[in-house]
Amino acid sequence: MADLRAVDHHMDGLRVLIASTPVGALGSGIGGGVELTLHNLVYGLGLRGHHVEVVAPADSLHVGERVHQIDGALQVSAQGLCREASTELPAGSVLAAMWSHIGSLQHETDVIINLAYDWLPYHLTQFLHVPVLHLVSMGSLSDAMDQVITEVERLRPGRLAVHSAAQAATFPDPSIFRVVGNGIVAERYDVQLTVPADAPLGFVGRISPEKGLEDVAELSARTGHRVLVWGILQDEVYWQRVQADNPQAILEYQGFLPTDDLQAQLGACAALVMTPKWVEAFGNVAIEAMAVGVPVIAYGRGGPAEIVDDGVTGFVVPADDIDALIAAVARVGEIDRAACRQRVDNEYSSGAMADRVLAWIDDVLAAPVRV
Ligand code: UDP
């Protein structure tokens, strides 16, 4: 028989603790989109009057009321994992230290939001007194993660959310997830409503095979379009190969920039091109581009295909179809750049995202806990 336990339910001034990814310090870029997601959540929940603190690896940038900086050995990113991969923790694991610390903060916390795609926090959910909500940042990658995620739903239903329906569909049971999209601090992005006829295309993302930069290189080689590339150089060998395979391509690497600089430069592009080879969970860069008035041309794969309103905020083309990509680039002048920004203000602002997350928190806090 399930017992019902009374849960404090005060939506005004919640004390929220956000657990960052253990793969890198906030601001390093190693955490990819999770870093931006975290910044936006902190800002949006703060905007709605809640008290937000963050637990993150040492040397993280300051964000929110307080960042608890935790020392320890970083976790290896999960993107490259094979399905059978075991869960590994290094000696002196920062992930373990972060969750010991989180455990010790429970008495001053109403709700914990976990952004780490790691086995340990999911497993610990059942042992913590404070509800832990998990915002899953990637699609299904390994059996061990799938299993522990399924177990959280069995023991603590309603605690799982994803960024897109396509992301949910990569897991064995998509129905266990709530889809909350994502958001950005739109106020930090300056819209550029016009660009010259010869404006370059943009590519933003970790330079790593799952992001499909080789297709953009081929597009550039075949059309002569310049492409500005921003992002962390995660896989140097891959980057060299993409260039060697497409000697005619005009790819101009701009480095990894802080958001304020990235948005200013990205706004000068004719379009952002997204050609992922994996099911992109969301694709923060799509809404960042739209926020600065840049239409998005994306493969019909994963989150970007749900974000882009075909013919309104960009174009969605069949995945891996470079001819279709080229045809869409030729039509980019049909897109109203103001409409791109408008869509962000309506659906992807910090406030809009915070409201979706607060509705989720509200449901969790209102639900009885089976013990
Ligand atoms: N980014 C950045 N500076 C750069 C290039 C990228 O801050 O020069 C950030 C970008 O704002 C985005 C993240 O890197 O938040 C990439 O996230 P996305 O969701 O697109 O992909 P992920 O890396 O999580 O797979």
Image (cartoon, helix red, strand yellow):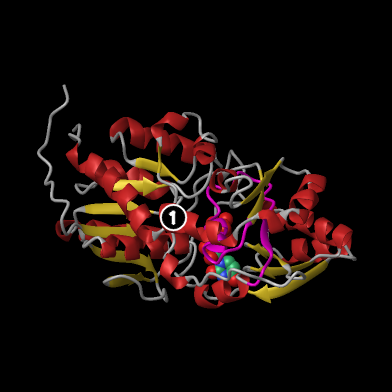
- Horizontal and vertical percent for residue 138? 52, 47
* Nearest the eye: 133 or 57: 133
Is residue 279 located in the magenta-colored stretch of the structure?
A: yes
Location of residue 140 in the rendering, given as x and y in whole percent from the top left corner:
53, 40
Tell me: residue 129, above or below residue 294. Answer: above
Name the residue tied to disc 1. 348
Q: Amino acid at mark 1?
A: Tyr
**Which residue does the image show at 61% across and 70% down from the upper left?**
266
Please give the range of residues in magenta: 268-295
Residue 240 appears in which quarter of the rendering? bottom right
Q: Is residue 18 left or right of residue 295?
A: left
Q: Nearer the viewer, residue 326 or 36?
A: 326
The residue under the point 78% across, 45% down is 324
- Tell me if I can see residue 95 in this picture: yes
Q: Which residue is outermost to the top?
A: 1
Q: Look at the image and tell me whether residue 29 can be seen.
A: no
Residue 108 included in the magenta stretch of the image = no
367 vs 158, left or right, is left
Task: Look at the image and tell me in which quarter the C terminus lies.
Answer: top left
Residue found at x 57% / y 46%: 309
The image quarter containing residue 350 is: bottom left
Dot 1 lies on which element?
loop
If the picture is divided into quarters, which one holds ligand 1?
bottom right
| Coordinates of residue 113 in the picture (x, y in percent) | 32, 53
Residue 33 higher or lower than 179, as above or below? below
Question: Which residue is drawn at the image coordinates 68% and 54% (left, top)?
Answer: 334
